[in-house]
Image (cartoon, coloured by chain):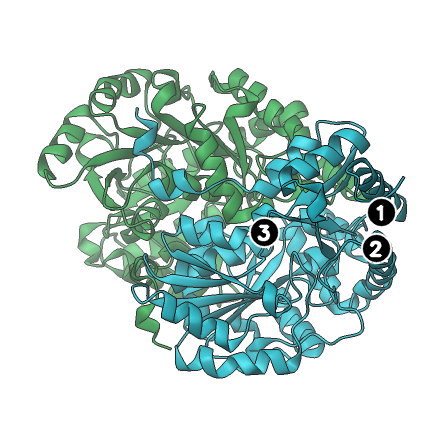
Chain colours: A cyan, B green
Amino acid sequence: MEMNELNPDVLLVQPSALRVFDHEISQDPEIIKLTLGEPDFNVPDHVKQAAIASINADQSHYPYFWGIQALREAASTYYREKFGYQYSADQIVCTVGATEGLSATFKTLFQPGEGVLIPAPAYPVYKALASINHLVPIMVDTTETGCVLTPQQVNEAIAAHPDVTIKGVVITDPSNPTGVVYSKAQLSALVPVFRDHQIWVISDEIYGELTYGVKHYSLSQWLPDQTIVINGLSKSHAMTGWRIGFAFGPTGVIDQIAKTHQFQVTTPTSIVQHAAVEALTHGQNDAAVMRQVYEQRCQYLTDSLTKLGISYVEPKGAFYIFMKIPERCHQDSFTFARQLAKNYHVGLMPGAPFGDSQALRISYASSNENLHAAVDALTKELVRDGVLAK
Amino acid sequence: MEMNELNPDVLLVQPSALRVFDHEISQDPEIIKLTLGEPDFNVPDHVKQAAIASINADQSHYPYFWGIQALREAASTYYREKFGYQYSADQIVCTVGATEGLSATFKTLFQPGEGVLIPAPAYPVYKALASINHLVPIMVDTTETGCVLTPQQVNEAIAAHPDVTIKGVVITDPSNPTGVVYSKAQLSALVPVFRDHQIWVISDEIYGELTYGVKHYSLSQWLPDQTIVINGLSKSHAMTGWRIGFAFGPTGVIDQIAKTHQFQVTTPTSIVQHAAVEALTHGQNDAAVMRQVYEQRCQYLTDSLTKLGISYVEPKGAFYIFMKIPERCHQDSFTFARQLAKNYHVGLMPGAPFGDSQALRISYASSNENLHAAVDALTKELVRDGVLAK
């Protein structure tokens, strides 16, 4: 059987460089990882107890494929109160984390060959999902505009690709990897251009509860009929491994996404769905404790980087700092990150998969001790490279 | 935004008629359902305890996307001992139930436009997965050969579709909806034709542990290099709602399936993966108790149908009986099934979605009391239709 006869869209897409790099450095038993986007907090106790109760109550049978009614109603209320989403329970599909919601959305919204705008630096899964669905990912460099997409950049990207029908855009807000949070003005400025060009907005708001001193707004507020919102409990309730997320969208379109979802997975794990009801009905403040800790860590890191003379994108949310590798290090992001891992057992994520081979992403969803180790490693490496004096 | 501009492969596929019908009749609070393929047993207690221990141990972080190593090793051993699979841990991907394994496999193995043979009567998700991946599902009627695919039927199907490159076949063994189990001779007879035509075998063996008086064989034994086996704990350990399955395949190909899987879901729920290790290492006999009960129920149903003069495919496995609606009822499967639901509050699955509009599927993964109610309802309906004397 010929391997090269498999689906070329699958063969050509690269496996997630983030997870491959994380797996690579994990072979070092001493490694201190600030790589994956994963809270170092545990699932809140009341949510764990709800999962245990669900197990003991034998709620092990197939939930309806959209997700159980109680969860969709809880999500409708919770996100309306948090961020002003205007979605009723029957406009919400429960997904296997945000990833599955994104996958079903990319598959459903677009026809093969159509283009999707991806503001960069970007979480690399968007590009992979575009490619694996035979779409054209169009990376839009936003580094000159503070890592915020502007209407002008959208217009320029459309003009630069006259042969591609551009049908979608991904907005990650708060942003992974930069921690940038769009202001109300920045979002509303994008509304006319998306409306005029009939561009579907995939609004990934998984870090929505993690903002520092600024408020999170959802593009769905302005464009309810052409926005699919992706959210979930991975970051707000530290439930990454439990795999529960939501796709919100206008009636008709969300029904099609639900169909794709059904044939992808049937439904997320029943006991997690029941636990998620608890998280959304009694865990409105679960993220607050984490947010406070993240904010302190963020402050510590930005202070430390500033002292080291390292530049970075000013973070306002999520739990990442996207820092520039000093030019005098003369190293690309993978070489530099491997160096840090090898010499100091500290794992930071290379920037190349996000679209900047001169940057690193630091996740501060990690203990203070680990953050100190990271700053230490960076300091030593800059000394070694002659960027800092000994 | 125009709905008809969404992905036509998604728009054109029908939502699962099984789940839609099940949902429809579930609106009747008195309904007795023998519809979905779902054990009425609960998850074995030792597996529930393992899940609870995993929750308490805060194993809530991202597992590696292939699944945790312990689970892949446990699956390698378990299925080797049960059915003689020859797959090492690094040839196994842990999936969100069998559905997600099937979805990733359909997406990965084939190029758009290629054909996949589906012996009918068939579980309707195969056809949907072919369509949603822009493949050509070629239904092969096997009712004349005891619902077992034969080499001759394969050759005829190939000859009948000269314009389609046929690259795959789905074998469901034990079969849903018929309960047929392929004999060793029937499977080995298919090997040359699949090998000569370089046809990928998707071998859905999710009911492998549920056979009555006959042994289950896996086509992977003969065709290890061109078979993807789909299995999981939904039926053997009554874990449908927990969503854990496996895809097994040759090195190289399984890596591509793992990649597709990663972008579909990241990974199955962590706590379920840990519980599944327990199921596979200490739950080798969990299915035995259920199998015994299913076998008794099967006997009761076949006896009862025979007494009523209703013909059916002789079941040897799974937990279904595929019965013919007597001709004198003059009703198609949906009308007949709705009649039973309306008049007697008994839900049996219409045969049409499986490919036979004159049949019904009875799931006997249901209590004896429910089975009695079903036989009662059928009896009354046949009297009402004048097929049986009062």
Q: Residue at x 38, y 65 (%)?
A: B343
Work out whether A125 lies above or below B182.
below
Mark 2 residue element: helix
Helix, strand or loop at mark 3: helix
Tell me the crowding category of disc 3: few under 14, some 14 to 19, or many 20 or more residues within 10 angstroms, Cα based.
Answer: many
Of the numbered discs 2 and 1, the one sitting upstream in the chain is: 2
Q: Which mark is residue A354?
A: 3
Q: Residue at x 74, y 50 (%)?
A: A362
Location of the N terminus of chain B by quadrant is bottom left
Tell whether label 1 touches label 2 (CB within 8 Å): yes
Near mark 2 (Cα within 10 A), the count class, few <14, some 14-19 or many ≥20, is many
Q: Earlier in the sequence, mark 3 or mark 2?
A: 2
> How many numbered circles does the render carry?
3
Q: Position of residue B94 (x, y in %)?
A: 55, 35
Instruction: Name the spot of residue B254 as percent of width and height, x first.
Output: 45, 30
**Amino acid type assigned to the residue bearing label 2 in the image:** Leu
Residue under label 2, please give it.
Answer: A301
Relative side of B213 to A368, left or right: left
Disc 3, disc 2: CB below 8 Å? no
Give the spatial CA distance, label 1 vs label 3.
21 Å
Chain letter of mark 3 equals A
**Host chain of mark 2:** A
Q: Does B296 sit above or below residue A17?
A: above
N-term-proximal mark, 1 vs 3:
3
Badge 1: residue crowd in 10 Å (few <14, some 14–19, many ≥20): many
Q: CA distance from mark 2 to mark 1?
A: 8 Å
Q: Which residue is under mark 1?
A: A371
Residue type highlighted by circle 1: Leu
Q: Disc 3 marks which amino acid?
A: Phe
